[in-house]
Amino acid sequence: MKNVVILGAGYGGLTALKGLKKVIKEGKVKVTLVNKNSYHYDTVNLHELSAGNIKREDICIEIKDILAETVNFVQDEVIKIDTDKKIVYTKQQELDYDLLVVGLGFETQTFGIEGMLENALPITDVNAAEKIFYRLESNFKKYAESEEKDIKDISVVVGGTGLAGIEFLAELVETRKELCNKYGIDEKLVKIYGLDAAPVLLPMFDKAYSDYARKFLEDRGIEIILGAGIKGATSDRFVVEIDGERRELLASTLVWTAGVKGSRIMDATFPELSKNGRLVTTQQLTVPGLEDIYIVGDCAAFIEEGQERPYPTTAQIACQMGTYTAKHIVNRLEGNSTPNFKYINRGVVCSLGSKDAIASAMGLKYKGFLAAKTKKAIEAKAINECTNIKTAIRNQRIF
Ligand SMILES: Cc1cc2nc3c(=O)[nH]c(=O)nc-3n(C[C@H](O)[C@H](O)[C@H](O)COP(=O)(O)OP(=O)(O)OC[C@H]3O[C@@H](n4cnc5c(N)ncnc54)[C@H](O)[C@@H]3O)c2cc1C
């Protein structure tokens, strides 16, 4: 019986596991899932948790609740993979594998910007997200209780206005209202900035739609500054350069969403193949020269034949990679070949709070409440792909 080890219970890892359900039941493979937490979390909702608009339990799913009894679950942190000996080392255990699926997700990337790692909070996992809301709330509380009334305490600067940055900024509209009500602060005093070095906002959408997102934020008092090269961060400011001029944006809550890279385990395991935690896979999602190792999700850089650049890392592609990998493994067990991985891009939706969004999906472009509902449906679909329909409906609150 083949021994399959899956690393990471994110979108990539769990869809791979789900795709192996039948062969696990038939006793054709023994599967071990390794994850550092006892739960899966929906990364695509972390901006809502960071803003305090949902709770941890809304986006966390206990792994034991979705796992078949026949799957061995190891709750531990992967620290090393020895590809010669075919052993995964966790903090507590050594796990042999015949086939390995690596889906260890992403980490923050600060491009060496001085002080960024130490002073700005990233949106990377549930603990990091909760830390952001905790920082926000304690700063608002401090402002309300202090005599000096330092405006920095009710100011927020977000570095990065990509999808995650814009979605987080839009969530802050609701957060600002809640915190100002709670602590008796005039909402008009709160300053919120979104900065980006890029000259264009949300380039994956047509301009009319990215303009809509920008207007949504600006109408609600959130300032978007593009072409702002972030040069450094200290505990209470971002130092930026705009049109050659240095400017400082002061805030006690600094958030960084401008860069992610794949897991550090990737560069350590594949020093010659992996860069920034991502490895260019074969067309069948395996490691070049190591056909027993599959890479899925944010650790994979998949460049389709005939193209030059990898697809962006998303939950959407992570799910498709996990499903493909499971099929590949099943075919392999049965001695069959598998056609190359083909990514089907179903589009993108950027939420603007819970009731608005912009969408470019299934060949259609639209915005507003319908787009917001589309986002929830996509999130539910991703959870279903990882777990089951019951969990998807419960977690996405779509009804
Ligand atoms: C705020 C935000 C909004 C986003 N919105 C969207 C969106 O709308 N649509 C979209 O398609 N994508 C979106 N993304 C991107 C998407 O979330 C990622 O591309 C996706 O989560 C990648 O899936 P994955 O399976 O590779 O990794 P993850 O989902 O990150 O899962 C990795 C798993 O591995 C575990 N792990 C990590 N390291 C170790 C270790 N050393 N040992 C053991 N376990 C470990 C983690 O705990 C985690 O459970 C968003 C991302 C963010 C941050």
Image (cartoon, grey):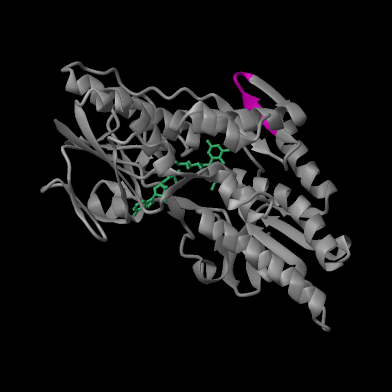
Q: Between residues 232 and 117, which one lies in front from this camera angle?
A: 117
The answer to whether residue 375 is left or right of residue 297 is right
Which residue shows up at 74% across the image and 76% down it? 142
Quadrant location of residue 284? top left
Quadrant location of residue 303? top left
Please give the range of residues in magenta.
358-363
Q: Position of residue 70 (x, y in %)?
A: 27, 35
- In this picture, is 179 found above or below 310? below
Q: Main secondary structure of the magenta part?
A: strand
The stretch drawn in magenta includes residue 273 = no
The answer to whether residue 82 is left or right of residue 253 is left
Which residue shows up at 47% across the image and 29% down it? 388
> Which residue is the extreme one toward the front?
69
Where's the N terminus, which quadrant? top left
Q: Position of residue 324 (x, y in %)?
A: 34, 25
Q: Position of residue 212 (x, y in %)?
A: 77, 37
Q: Position of residue 87 (x, y in %)?
A: 16, 49
- In this picture, is 298 found above or below 158? above
